[in-house]
Image (spheres, grey):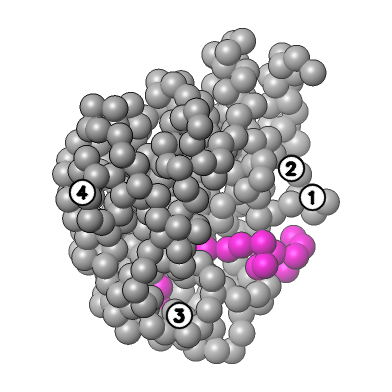
Amino acid sequence: MTPLFLGLASAALTDAERSFFKSLDPAGYILFKRNVTDAAQLRALTDALRDLSSRADVPILIDQEGGRVARMQPPVWPAFPRAELFDRLYDIAPVTAIEAARHNAQAIAVMLGEAGINVDCLPLLDVRQPGAHDIIGDRALGTEPLRVAAMGRAVIEGLRAGGAVGVVKHVPGHGRAMADSHVELPVVDADATALEMDLAPFIALNSAPMAMTAHVVYPAWDADQCASLSAKVIGEIIRGRIGFDGLLMSDDLGMHALSGDFGERAAGVLAAGCDIALHCSGDMAEMEAIAGSVGQIGTAAKARLDRAMATVAGARSNTSLDDLIAKRDALLAVLPA
């Protein structure tokens, strides 16, 4: 098994992808809107990925946050609210907001499970900051760390109850960034004392099964490398100060915050301490370059992967998707129109 989560080019596996994935045996896969057309197609695709890997619990990831980040969309699947709505509800009724976030996450997980998807890249634990770039914006659970942690915990619990592994992101915090790391490399100039605010939700949820790094430079910790490529940030901050010992994946290697060829990027994030390198585009040439730069997954990384997937082994929701959505909507009804 190789320490890679890889994307696919389209809505069905090509012969080239089948051959490549079979020989490479990536640790898992990630799906995007281009891979999704309808319920039958999506289930056939995820079944094919499981058959190809010969692992019933192979991680199949998706970014299904709700709001503007949703790969599975109406009219085939229900729409889910942006995280900001739960933050607004928390202002009125904190316990109600936490319960609404839990029901919402469980509903997402049930929907994903019907499609054969078992990992959701959610929740964001990024603490929203005034004036920062809107790449986080209304995707955040709030501006106050304890609030973000409380609702983030509810999201992880809801996902687990519905049979999906949650991924906390973007560790050690993307909320202050003044640029979009999809487009350029953000640099967060806050000092170490100020950055404690960003770390707080990740510390509170350091037992999360999986986490995704931020392609962000924090000069207070490492002036030369972004977190995904920094052995110091991963070792001293993520594994040390935060105390996270779950599976750590990089953010997408294809984002323009990173430089160098794709083989260098993959080797770099793994050398820095990520357990898994994430590549999303499905571009075969890029994946071949990555494959040539990585070896087999390490013992510790494999153990973390197995431990993360075991958290949802046999999980099956006793509540239907429609019932969970109804419960969530009844709680959100407290919000003023």
In which quadrant is the N terminus drawn?
Answer: bottom left
Label located before the other in sequence (2 or 3): 2
* Mark 4 vs mark 1: in front: 4
Q: Look at the image and give the residue range highlighted in magenta.
A: 25-43
Q: Tag 1, which secondary structure? A: loop
Residues packed near mark 3 inside 10 Å, few (<14), some (14 to 19) or many (20 plus): some
The reply to whether dot 4 and dot 3 touch (C-beta < 8 Å) is: no
Label located before the other in sequence (2 or 4): 2
Residue 23 visible in the snapshot: yes
Q: Tag 4, which secondary structure? A: strand
Location of residue 282 with respect to 71 vertically, above or below = below
* Mark 1 vs mark 3: in front: 3
Residue behind mark 2: 79
Q: Is residue 246 left or right of residue 36?
A: left
Residue in the image at 66% along x and 45% along y: 68
Residue in the image at 40% along x and 24% along y: 145
Residue behind mark 3: 286
Residue 173, percent from left and from top: 37, 39
Label located before the other in sequence (4 or 1): 1
Q: Which mark is residue 74?
A: 1
Q: How many marks?
A: 4
Q: Is residue 92 left or right of residue 270?
A: right
Specify the amino acid type for callout 1: Pro
In which quadrant is the C terminus drawn?
Answer: top right
Residue behind mark 4: 222
Residues packed near mark 4 inside 10 Å, few (<14), some (14 to 19) or many (20 plus): some
Residue in the image at 65% along x and 68% along y: 35
The reply to whether dot 2 and dot 1 touch (C-beta < 8 Å) is: yes
Residue in the image at 69% along x and 54% along y: 72
The reply to whether dot 2 and dot 3 touch (C-beta < 8 Å) is: no
Residue 115, percent from left and from top: 65, 57
Foreground residue, 227 or 239?
227
